[in-house]
Amino acid sequence: MSLAIRFDDIRKEFGPVRVLHGVSFELAPGRIYGLLGENGAGKSTLMKILAGYEQPTSGSVLVDGAPRQFDGSRAAEAAGIVLIHQEFNLAEHLTIAQNMYLGHEKRRGLLLDDAAMRADAKRYLAQVGLTKHPDTKVRDLIVAEKQMVEIAKALSRRARLLIMDEPTATLTPAETERLFALMTKLKADGVTIVYISHKLDEVERITDEVIVMRDGRFVARNETASLARQQMANLMVGRELSDMFPDKVPVPDDAPVALRVERLHVPEWVEELSFDVRAGEVFGFAGLVGAGRTEAFEAMIGLRHRSAGTIEIGGRRVELKSPRDAMRHGLTYLSEDRKGKGLHVNLNLQDNLTLMTLERYTHPLLDLKAGRAALADAVRDFGIRTGDLGSRARMLSGGNQQKLALAKFLQPNPNVIVLDEPTRGVDIGAKRDIYFLIHRLASEGRAVIVISSELIELIGLCHRVAVMRAGRLQAVLGLAHLTEEELIAHATGTH
Amino acid sequence: MRPAPTDTRAPTPRGMRVAHVLYGFGPLAGLIVLCIAGTLLNRDFATVDNMMNVLTRTSFIGIIAVGMTFVIISGGIDLSVGSMAALIAGIMIWLMNALAGGIGGHTFAPLAIVAIGIACALLLGAVFGCAHGLLITKGRIEPFIVTLGTLGIFRAVLTWLADGGALTLDNNLSDLYGPVYYASFLGMPVPIWVFLVVALGGALILNRTAFGRHVQAIGSNEQVARYAAIRVDTVKIVTYVLLGICVGVATMLYVPRLGSATPTTGLLWELEAIAAVVVGGTALKGGEGRVIGTVIGAVLLSVIANILNLTSIISVYLNAAVQGVVIIVVAFLQRGRR
């Protein structure tokens, strides 16, 4: 019993804003579909309608030929349609089994039947290949495991159509492999999968068919095998995307060392990390999730305890006890967690942009006009697309939020800027803009450090890439050795 | 593909701006409706005397509520302000009486004694606030717990100092100190002037200084603020110190009114101050809020009490109940604001 879905002229309006302009297409059962589109193309909204989280303004969803209106995710789940959110819907303090049956608890009389739930949970966990005990608390799991729990949960609800929104955004290559194996298995069992992702190489590998949306409209569908990656990108953006990366400019031989770190030690995370980055250099950090890259830099700027290590900026030894110290010495760090650590999504654009450098606008009262002018400059320089300069940061798309965050962390005019996953959850157009921006920063003579899980990005951008594994530096690869194979080999320890 | 850079002065869409302004005026509109109702119910309501009376009584809670606004916007809370006011009043009176009796044969001029008393009130407020801030930030204890603890400690220490009874200010000093509460300047009682200055100062600090912006940023998302190189702990401590000083100012105005401190001094002030902040439109979870809203909230709550006093429709004993209803209704109206 697989599900066939048909969208029939779906329109959706949020107040005066129309996000879907009459979308129609079909999904045949038992296939894996790649749903592509830039941020704001309407793919998430369409999938939320399918999964019962939103109702269409007009148009209908047909399930196996019959029009269905789901008035909530529970109703959709009952029909076998489950959406797995990018940010998981798991209660961290509860166990795996408790999470899987949350809201659908098995009972014996008035009491919960924990034994039955545990046993069932075990079965579904085995099915997705997760070897954790069902009584493990979800907060003790790593991201990839949480995702497995989400999928097991969907299976326990008898899901016949699974929608996955950016499932590999936070996964390591090995974990991604496991997820793909599971997806293939589910497909063989007759489950239809809609796979939303910005990673075109993955779409190319795992999907049978690609559906492209743009600006709230259906644009194209094609067998995956018949499309080249470049064609997919062009369809999404609606223009020729000739080259994602700017040409690398060699670092001059006499460029001074901008940042030198020696024997950095972060308890439980990083051991003996030493490296240096020169002015004008783009220096990458590769490694699996948990390799200690983020933790190393958080410790460098005083957000974590470091037990040993020396830091030199511009040739001078510095003591950095807080992000403020780091900023004063010309180093800023933009976190990978944009909404949790990078931007105040509930504050407006100007307050976000000027937050780190308010002293500059204080004489002694805040000069709001100067702040507005700074925002206007940033919007122009960084290509931030916003209809309204007075709006809050949460109203921007992911890509534009990221540009705003970059602008914010460049306000103090750092000589060394650390960008942690600078293009996560960002559409292709904005990605390209960010790559060119990084290139510009380096050519201005700054040292740019890019931490990324996307190997193509590191290879395309960086002069050198450091690979970390389990808290230790494995290798620093120069231009001649920058290939996916080398990076993966060092990151996984199979070199 | 990319639209031309937007004009800097591009206005917010008119509809949104109007809605925003209306939200801001919600508490004010409520206050106006209440005043109209009060005027219709009793002719004495709309007299200058009554207005001054209401505002004078509001000033204690109002001043504390301005400080509380900072603490709540930064994501904190202070439950101890009522007890703190009582203890400050008690220590202040005890100190002034001791000085009046002379120390080691040395006597002080009465005016100097009052000045020392006032300085003591402000200093104690700052010290208590600083202690709160340090326990909350460096000690990493929830503000609710810290101030719940000091709520008990402050009041118990006062009760012990007063031996369960009252600490009463020396008569001569009382006569000298009295005008701070009872006198008027340019036709307006002194406490209202002080309230006005505190409120204007508070609004200026919140909206137009880096500190005020940092307070909002921390309340909106502490983690983001930390990563943006803001000295989160310092800013938080300062909010509690500011609130402590506000409590000191309120106490300094309150002491000359009755000239004594008892175990019931300042009872439930914390609730009234928090209520004023919330009614004024500041979200309890922090991030946003306005000092002017707090001022209106404080006035609104005392107008309710005043109307109940002047009319006999609802028993004055139900004052707290009516205020409670108002708080819940306001919270209900502000539900989906974020």
Image (spheres, coloured by chain):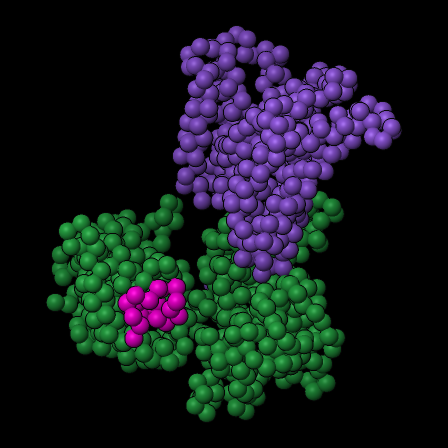
Chain colours: A green, B purple
Q: Using the rendered image of the protein, determine whether residue A144 is visible from the camera's viewpoint.
A: yes
Quarter of the rendering containing residue A480: bottom right
Q: Pick out the residue farthest to the top.
A: B43
**Residue under the image location 19 percent in, 58 percent down:** A113
Image quadrant assignment for residue A277? bottom right
Position of residue A387 relative to residue B271, above or below, is below
Identify the residue at image location x=52%, y=7%. Answer: B43
Residue A235: tell me if it is visible.
Answer: no
**Count of marks overlaid on the render:** 0
Question: Where does residue B161 sit, x and y in percent of width and height?
Answer: 65, 31
Task: Name the one closer to the observer, A435 or A405.
Answer: A405
For image coordinates 68% across by 42% down, the residue present is B127
Left or right: A410 as drawn, with respect to A336: right
The location of residue A215, given as percent across then percent down, is 38, 60
Q: What stretch is highlighted in magenta?
A: A131-151
Q: Indicate the quadrant where residue B203 lies.
A: top right
The verdict on residue B69 being magenta is no
Q: Position of residue A209 (x, y in %)?
A: 26, 74
Q: Nearer the viewer, residue A247 or B74?
A: B74
Q: Which residue is drawn at 82% across and 23% down?
A: B110
